[in-house]
Image: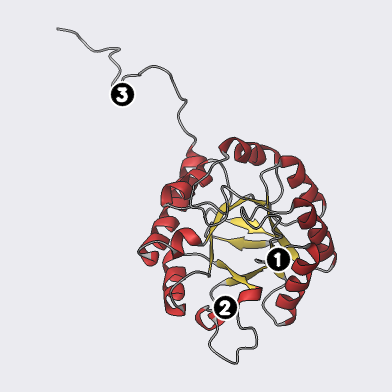
Amino acid sequence: MDTFNIAGRTFRSRLIVGTGKYKSGAETARALEASGAEMVTVAVRRVNLDRTRESLLDFIDTEKYVLLPNTAGCYTADEAIRTARLGREVGLSDWVKLEVIGDEKTLYPDVQATLEATRVLVREGFTVLPYTSDDVVFAKRLLDAGASAIMPLGAPIGSGMGIQNRANIQILRELITGVPLIIDAGVGIASDAAIAMELGADAVLMNTGIAHAHDPILMAEAMKLAVQAGRSAYLAGRMPKKLYATASSPLEGVVRS
């Protein structure tokens, strides 16, 4: 079976999904089921952690899904570090999808603050999966700091624009080894997920592309199949591109009348 590993934990599904933006908790649960995902992200700052009233966590079966708390909404390293600690203290996980936003309009990451927070959280025993730019130099610095994955954006968060940086993703795939390369942000439709996987990503993380579809449940299933197809295509190896046509049925050996 084709699996991948993060920090010693093995996953069969290469699709990681978010839990925000759905119409209801029930819809969230149905979409998670349809996606086939084994890991789901939860924004620490956007859920009711004390469970005194209905919470998103009521709709996530923690026996079935690995929770990946995220620091969405944090704009400084200190904010992100405190949020990660809170997620661990209330029993969510000592894994964290680290997000430190540097620009409110584009939601691009503050790479220096991300690096600073990664160093601190790794020292404190967290498994850190940082959302980052597609800069290979910075990705290597995150690895040196102890990151357990590299998670570059394919396009701005929530944009649905698809993979806009194919060359950079290919460079990252070639030069980043030892930890998974996970495309995070920008996927809008199934073909985007397939392209990400065809470029060699180990997994794809998405939320809006599923949650904002007209039929989130059906889109979740489509994304599952797209990730599987893209992975198979990557492993199979594409045919060489050519400028001119090549006959599908060669004429060599054909007897002409």
What residue is pinned by disc 1? 74
Amino acid type, mark 2: Thr
Residue 257 appears anywhere in the view: yes
Q: Nearer the viewer, mark 1 or mark 2?
A: 1
Q: Are marks 1 and 2 in contact (CB under 8 Å)?
A: no
Residue 58 located left or right of residue 97:
left
Nearest the camera: 179 or 50?
A: 50
- Determine the secondary structure under disc 2: loop
Mark 3 highlights which residue?
248
The answer to whether any part of residue 146 appears in the image is no
Location of residue 226 in the rendering, given as x and y in whole percent from the top left corner = 43, 51
Distance of mark 1 from mark 2, alpha carbons? 25 Å
Q: Which mark is residue 5?
A: none
Q: Secondary structure at mark 3?
A: loop
Closer to the camera, 151 or 1? Answer: 151
Does label 1 or label 2 sit earlier along the sequence? 2
Residue 144 screen position, x and y as percent? 82, 50
**What amino acid is found at the position of numbered circle 3 in the picture?**
Ser
**Callout 3: 10 Å neighbours few (<14), some, many (20+)?**
few
Image vertical order of residue 230 relative to residue 98, above or below: above
Which residue appears farthest toward the front when viewing the image? 105
Residue closer to the observer: 57 or 232: 57
Q: Which disc is residue 62 wearing?
A: 2
